[in-house]
Amino acid sequence: MIKIPIEIGDIVYVGRFKNKRVVVKSIEYNEYGLPLINGRPLLTVRIGKLMPKTESIKVSSSIKLKDLLK
């Protein structure tokens, strides 16, 4: 058995590109024993708390084109 660290209230990402945030409201199992999150198969979601934290890329506004051309 695989233990999955998902609880009710966690955030998972669903959709074609796994980019829509959805709060877990129910965890169920289908007739084959596979877990369902909000009625969707678990293998088609991304778990938010297991994703690596990324930092946004900040572009320095002090660099100007004329400084780059020198």
Image (spheres, rainbow, N blue to C red):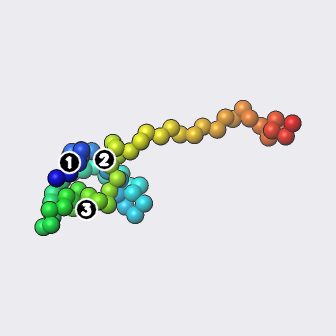
Give me the disc on residue 11. 2
Q: Please state the horizontal and vertical placement of residue 24, each as a whole percent of the image.
A: 24, 50
Q: Which residue is drawn at 23% across and 48% down?
A: 4
Q: Which amino acid does label 1 sit on?
A: Lys
Pointer 1 residue = 3
Element assignment for label 1: loop
As shown in the figure, which amino acid type bears the numbered disc 3? Pro
Residue occupying image coordinates x 19% and y 58% = 35
Quickly name the residue at label 3.
41
Vertical position of residue 20 compared to residue 5: above or below: below
Residue that appears at 53% across and 40% down = 56
Nearest to viewer (mark 2 / mark 1): 1
Residue 65 is situated, as x and y percent measured from the top left of the image, at 79, 40
Q: Are marks 3 and 1 in contact (CB under 8 Å)?
A: no
Residue lying at the far right of the rendered structure? 70
Q: In this view, does 60 lie to the left or right of 52?
A: right
The answer to whether the residues at label 2 and label 3 have Cβ atoms under 8 Å apart is no
Characterize the local packing of mark 2: few (<14), some (14-19) or many (20 or more) Cα atoms within 10 angstroms. Answer: some
